[in-house]
Amino acid sequence: MTFLRPSITANGSAILVPALAFVVVVFTFNLVMAFVPLSAQRKNELTNLVRQDCGSCHGMTMQGGLGKPLLPENLIESTPEELAEIILAGVPGTPMPPWRGLLARGDALWIAAQLKTGRIKRGNTQ
Amino acid sequence: MRTWLSVLFAALIPLGLLASNFHGQARSPALANSQPGLRGTGDLGVIIERASGSVQIIETTGQSSLARIKGLGDLSHASVVFSRDQRFAYVFGRDGGLSKIDLLQQTLAKRIIQAGNSIGGAISDDGKLIAVSNYKPGGVKIFNADTLVLIATIEATYGDQGELSKTVGLVDAPGGRFLFTLYEAGEIWMVDCADCAQGAKPRLTKFKNIGLQPYDALISGDGRYYIAGLFGEDGMALIDLWAQKPAVTRILDGYGRGQKKLPVYKMPHLEGWAKADNHYFLPAVGHHEVLVVDAKTFKQSGSIKVHGQPIFVMARPDGRQIWINFAHPRNDTLQVIDVKTKQIIKQFTPGKAILHMEFTPRGEQVWVSVRDENRIDVYDTRTLKKITSLPANAPSGIFFTWRAGRIGL
């Protein structure tokens, strides 16, 4: 929350209050968005992203590449929430990048669920 | 009366066909003097259509598609090398498939599945051996280029438990050699296979502790330097193959130090590295920069700020221009650098997911794949204008036959 720091001056609280309000709004927005079902168009975009862009490291059919295979049998041990967290935060010290900023939590959860059921298969979107 | 007319009509049809045929030939001077069906392969190439497991055979003189070969499996990240006579293309698929395509007959000449998961390949200097770099099982396999019969398997073992490492950056080197890099192990291995076609065993030289997570490698066009890029550290590992006793030295240590490294959404490729005007131009990992490196000292002499994280940094054959594409999410853009002034002289946004570029042999055209637009765009590199577009099914790699005569390609 770096935007809080430089703003605190003589009339700091005047800025602090709207800033806090902003944080609350953003937080609830994210919370709500995580549960709003994704549109069909967004699902198509995400399927394409997973196959093509995740696929550049994990293989287009998720059978693995430089990154681990992401087939259902490889992901049994992890819950969708845990996988979503890995997707958003990345795995430090490995090439797995953090996707936060490009993907919302709702996106990541949807991708995680798709991966666990193996529904992201070739031919889905093209 | 009716029958008589139809007979006359039937007799006229072939004549008409002949006439239109002559007309067709007259318009195509390249074919005018040749016997029917006879052509060279110097202006041919293949385009990978990664979603449909097919390749298109194209020609760059008239910029047209000649044929589509199907049934090549999972072609994400596929690459291609050519036989030394430029007649056959060897396609390395992600699913371990190795396919040999006859560019003249426009047929799939042979196809084998040689591993579970593979990343690329190389052809020996004498054209007799094909080597394939595998993720699973980690290692390199060597085949007879003619028959695709297995000649040797090199397991990339490392550590105490005998684990197998993924292999990357496989290239050919003069003297019947191949070099490749072990991703998990952080090693470079050199394979002397000069007599493998005659039944000799490959001889291995291992270079250890080259650095963390080497992700790709290149060999200089003269076959002298092998350079591996490191993902886990800012720097590269270099071997001078002309040295009495080749050894690894580290170059470019700590480039970009002090700058925040950005998340890397796609690994850069070194294969399309560029040497021009006595400098190497290389993609910086995790930075929106192209590194400029002195080709004699291997010291960084500068960097060029670019639009995103570079993926391919490719020099036009004369070395005057460098063309660059970028990682997701900035992969809708191409930039052109003028080597003399090191300035960006042109920026294009042809469409989403620009994956690869290939120059014609002397560089007057460059072909660009725009995956999500299902299109190949062809540019004139002098006017920097688009000449034409060809439809292609989610195109990725573009490979032209001139590669047959180049070390490391």
Image (cartoon, rainbow, N blue to C red):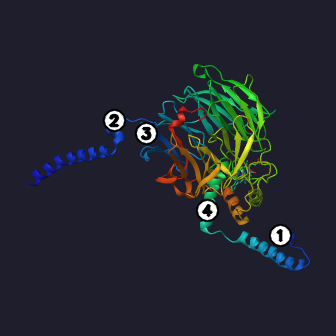
Residue with the mark numbered 2: B34
Q: How many labels does the image show?
A: 4
Residue with the mark numbered 4: A45
Instruction: Name the mark on residue A3.
Output: 1
Q: What residue type is labelled 2?
A: Ser
Q: Distance between the residues labelled 4 and 2?
A: 49 Å
Q: How far apart are marks 3 and 4 (CA)?
A: 35 Å
What is the secondary structure assignment of the residue under circle 1? helix
Q: Nearer the viewer, mark 3 or mark 1?
A: 1
Q: Residue placed at 70% from the left, 36% from the top?
A: B227
Q: What residue type is labelled 3?
A: Gln
Crowd tier of the residue under label 2, counting other residues whose Cα lies within 10 Å: few below 14, some 14–19, many 20 or above: few
Work out whether residue A123 can be spotted.
no
Q: What residue type is labelled 4?
A: Glu
Crowd tier of the residue under label 4, counting other residues whose Cα lies within 10 Å: few below 14, some 14–19, many 20 or above: few
Crowd tier of the residue under label 1, counting other residues whose Cα lies within 10 Å: few below 14, some 14–19, many 20 or above: few
Q: What residue type is labelled 1?
A: Phe
The reply to whether the C-beta atoms of the residues labelled 3 and 4 are less than 8 Å apart is no
The answer to which of marks 3 and 2 sits earlier in the sequence is: 2
Q: How far apart are marks 1 and 2 (CA)?
A: 73 Å
The reply to whether the C-beta atoms of the residues labelled 1 and 4 are less than 8 Å apart is no
What is the secondary structure assignment of the residue under circle 4? helix
